Amino acid sequence: MISPPASHRVPPLAATTFGYRADIQGLRAVAVVLVVLWHAGVTAMPHGYVGVDAFFVISGYVITGLLLRERQTTGRIRFGRFFARRARRLLPASGVVIAATVLLAWWLVPSLRHASIARDALASTLYVENWRLAAQAVDYTVQEAAASPFQHYWSLGVEEQFYLTWPLLFALATPRGSFRRGVLTVRLAVLVGAIATASFVWSVIETTQRPGPAYFSTFTRAFEFAAGAGAAVFIHRAHRRSMPIHTAHLVGWTGLALIVTSALWQPAGAVFPGWVAIIPVVGAVLALVGAADHRSAGPAGLLSTRPFTVIGDLSYSWYLWHWPLLVVAEAQWGRLTVLASGAVVVASLGPAALTYRYIESPIRHSPRTARTLSGLSVGGASMAVAAAASAVLWIAAPTLRPLDDSTESALDEIATAATLPTPTDPATATGSESPPTNDPSDEQAPDPSSPPTLPELGALTIDEPGEQSGYRQDKEVDEIVNDPATVLDVPDRVACRQSVEGTELIECVLGDPDGSFEIALVGDSKAAQWVSALDEIGIARGWRVMVVSKAACAFSGLTLARDGVEYTSCTKWNQHALDYLVEERPDLILVTGRTPSVWRNGTALSRDDSQSLLVEDWARRLTTLTDNDSAVAVLSETPTPRLDVPECVVANRDDLTRCTFDRDGSFDRDLETAAARVGGISVIDLNDAICPGDECPVVVGNVMVYRDTTHLSDTYARTLIPLLASALDRAAGSME
């Protein structure tokens, strides 16, 4: 028998092509469950974000199907009607969730984050949050901040941008005279193929070169919508053909298996989206095509069952609600366990159901909003409410100012003290021009043998062993000069540090540009935290200070990992950095930074496995520098709090001890180990003036010690200038 009996064949695909399909709601359920499980931290679902890719394919299929049907039956595309349908379908629920999240953030999230949250809320209202996050993906300081409650709106931004552009491209590709089914589908197939090919190639290239921005980019995701559109064109084209039911079931089951498998496993070293995104995308396409028969058996039957369709109906509202509630919960109770996160996302089904029942569904199906103008008005009003809420939070957010004049004056006094000559002044030791000092004939000049009394501020209150012994964090303090609620305390010279994506060295010379004694600061962002202090020391000493720094990139000849993927830009930058230092041959090279993860054989190694490799590599690099006639000093890594210190300080002014953390394990000494192997390398360890006991304080001498989860505040680093300057003098003196 050439073909199976009629009872074993799927009805013509066009019979049920673009009407309501319960199985699509079921596929939405699969997609949203994958996403929320991933957001909840379920380790068994390490790549649940592929649910978003399935959503993109579904959107491409559904929207293209609607446009095909309208073009085929009416001969035109009514843009106003199309956009009105999208507006009443998506904007009311989104506007309500944005406004509600803004209210929750104002009430339950630390005020330091309000301005940033307000900006995210506004970007989400305008559906450009994906581009805001893409820009932040290259800003290391932003990446270390707590997650935004609107971060998940990036995917909605990509979808809305598709909704705005696809109908226009569709209309341009199908002018009058092309409405015959064959001509129409051929034209669309060419358009879809061109977009899919260009976007996929760009996704592979961009993901390799700039993985952060690539993840959020509309251009790297366009092929996923195009794949869904291609499925719609295929089904429309095949309307007279029939697919054997067993083949249809096999195709459908294969599609579901690909989606779930890609959520559970991905090739080692693969960066998403890139080429690997093709797996869930093809899976979603196969699930749509294979389940198009609407029969009760096979994948369509499973996806059409009540549990799947109910979750599918709630999928949009659930997606909107689950992430803000997770972020707010963590703001209240700290990092959640997987069980607690799971409870939060399950609980978020409550507001999701209410939103669907009383906002999403009624507005979508109400005769009052069926007209084009009414639908657009409802959408516009929803956006206006969300924008107004965002603006109110933005206006009410704390306004940060620079340090006050008295604190700046005290810091200037501390820096000025570094002009006093020392017995091991490097300029004298190397025979170069002496740095500018006070004229001894001036009766106002300080006596070098009698150091001036410095302000009791920050590290200067614990710069002696007797002050460090038994030091404990005060429960309360009268004043914090760099109070995080009112003061912006970051280095002025952040532009000296290369971004995560950059590979070239940034030419950054501080201190005295004409100084004959050259010092190079080399390392990651933990090196860059010393920029202001070294700048002032350089000015005072007459030293030329060169900054060689890149975000999250340790000074290493190995291939390193960042966020579990190969850090290719770091590898390239590191080669440029070494070449520059060898060619420039600074008098003193100051190296510091964190111990990173090494990338080897397509995977990120653990800290323990990375440690020995890094020590060997650092020893080789340090030897290269010392053999090149540069003095080298290693500046010990500073303790890492692993909590957002400014937020903790603001929330616990009545008991700052709640913000302290264990010194043990808060920093590594691997770079120092490498220095010891080489020999002749000075080690500068200022940690006793940062964390003098077993518990590291967060406010010392009325100065907040850290500006975030990792780095010293600029003010505290500047109070360490006398200690750092003295240590540098000794390191430079060793060159004699």
Image (cartoon, grey):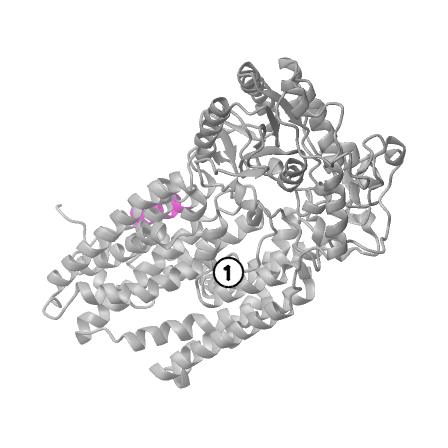
The picture places residue 592, in percent across and down from the top left corner, at 62, 30
**Residue carrying label 1:** 319
Instruction: Identify which residue, 494 or 243, lies in the foreground.
Output: 494
Q: Residue at x 60, y 62 (%)?
A: 115
The quadrant in which residue 403 appears is bottom right
The answer to whether residue 560 is visible is yes
Amino acid type of the residue tagged 1 in the rendering: Tyr
The picture places residue 397, in percent across and down from the top left corner, at 64, 66
Vertical side of 404 occupied by 431: above or below: above
Instruction: Identify which residue, 125 or 630, lies in the foreground.
Output: 630
Q: Residue at x 67, y 64 (%)?
A: 398
Q: Residue at x 22, y 51 (%)?
A: 193
The picture places residue 587, in percent across and down from the top left corner, at 58, 23
The quadrant of the image that shows the C terminus is top right
State the extent of the magenta-drawn residues as a range.
249-259
Instruction: Identify which residue, 330 or 483, lies in the foreground.
Output: 483
The quadrant in which residue 263 appears is top left
- Left or right of 655? Residue 398 is left
Q: Main secondary structure of the magenta part?
A: helix
Mark 1 Cα shell of 10 Å, populated few (<14), some (14-19), many (≥20): many
The answer to whether residue 29 is visible is no
Determine if the magenta segment contains residue 258. Answer: yes
User: Which residue appears farthest toward the front when viewing the image?
Assistant: 441
> The residue tagged with tag 1: helix, strand or loop?
helix
Q: Residue at x 62, y 46 (%)?
A: 491
The quadrant in which residue 234 appears is bottom left
- Left or right of 588? Residue 71 is left
